[in-house]
Image (cartoon, rainbow, N blue to C red):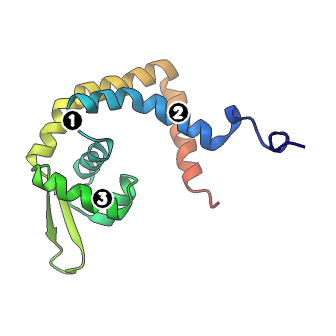
Amino acid sequence: MTIQSHTKSTSRSLPIALLRARETVMAPIRDMLQGIQLTEQKWRILRVLDELGEVEQSTIANEACLLLPSLTRILRTMEAEGQITRRQDSQDKRRTMVKITEEGRRILKENLETSLAISNNIEAQMGREKLDHLLDLLEELQAVKV
């Protein structure tokens, strides 16, 4: 008996389906980012900081889906490029607070139209109701204990 007879086909495998969906969504975003020479990780960090304001590094790591050691390295580069600022927390010297700069906001603003067009294209093809339902289901999935 083969392993295949005990498992679902790859088209119905949740991990593979999620990866395929991610690639579908990310392809046009990667094209946009390649044009401005920005990595996916930096884009996510800028979006998180623009949304949340000044926050601690672990919050960014969690919200942007990055490992803390990778984030620390990326933040060093972003600080040198003037996209973010970092400072020690005045109450807890072990914590590093991070904030987006005007340069970081400029990058987001200059690419907002393209980013929205990508999102609108997905919504137009799927429909608002289906897209909202998918996002609700994905939030539910994140709460599942495996």
Q: Residue at x 26, y 54 (%)?
A: 52
What's the distance in space between the residues labelled 2 and 3, CA to CA? 25 Å
Q: Residue furthest front?
A: 2
State the residue in front, 17 or 47. 17
Residue 100: x and y in percent read 16, 52
Q: Secondary structure at mark 1?
A: loop
Residue 86: x and y in percent read 15, 63
Q: Nearer the viewer, mark 2 or mark 1?
A: 1
Give above or below for 64 relative to 16.
below
Which residue is labeled 1 in the image?
A: 37
Q: Residue at x 35, y 25 (%)?
A: 118
Neighbour tally class for label 1: few under 14, some 14-19, many 20 plus, Cα within 10 Å:
few
Which residue is labeled 3 in the image?
A: 71
Give above or below for 91 relative to 103.
below
Residue 26: x and y in percent read 41, 33
Q: Secondary structure at mark 2?
A: helix
Neighbour tally class for label 3: few under 14, some 14-19, many 20 plus, Cα within 10 Å:
many
If you read the primary sequence from the N terminus, does the residue marked by circle 2 or circle 1 appear first? Answer: 2
The C terminus lies in which quarter of the figure? Answer: bottom right
Q: Secondary structure at mark 3?
A: helix
- Disc 1 marks which amino acid? Gln
Q: Quadrant of residue 40?
A: top left
The N terminus lies in which quarter of the figure? Answer: top right
- Disc 3 marks which amino acid? Leu
Which residue is labeled 2 in the image?
A: 21
